[in-house]
Amino acid sequence: LSTVYSFDGILVFGLLFICTCAYLKKVPRLNSWLLSEKKGVWGVFYKAAIIGTRLHIAVALSCLAMAFYVAFLK
């Protein structure tokens, strides 16, 4: 439970959240259901999907760096 509140745990969660939302944006049925709202609490999913699609190279490199850190350095 302590890894949830560590900084690297928050980074892993954020990266996985962004990657998941970007993937769900590519699925038509889920895109219209989950990512239709652009404001409010549900707008977080939309904004994460936009970050994941526009900055896909930076997100992918961050995921690789975090995977290396978690697997070998932690």
Image: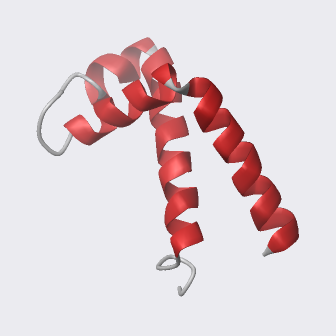
Locate residue 40 relative to residue 64 in the image: left or right.
left
Relative image position of residue 46 (x, y in whole percent): 30, 30
Residue at image position (47%, 20%) is 54
In which quadrant is the C terminus drawn?
Answer: bottom right
Which is nearer the eye, 12 or 58? 58
Residue 3 lies in quadrant: bottom right
Q: Residue furthest top?
A: 28
Residue at image position (47%, 79%) is 5
Residue 68 lies in quadrant: bottom right
- Rendered view: 57 above or below 32: below
Locate residue 27 relative to residue 50 in the image: left or right.
right
Which is nearer the eye, 25 or 54? 54
Color encoding of the figure: secondary structure
Relative image position of residue 1 (x, y in whole percent): 53, 85
Query: Number of marks in the image?
Result: 0
- Rendered view: 44 above or below 14: above
Residue at image position (52%, 78%) is 6
Q: Residue furthest bottom?
A: 2
Q: Residue furthest left?
A: 40
Relative image position of residue 2 (x, y in whole percent): 54, 87
Locate residue 65 relative to residue 50 in the image: left or right.
right
Q: Residue furthest front?
A: 58
Residue at image position (58%, 26%) is 56
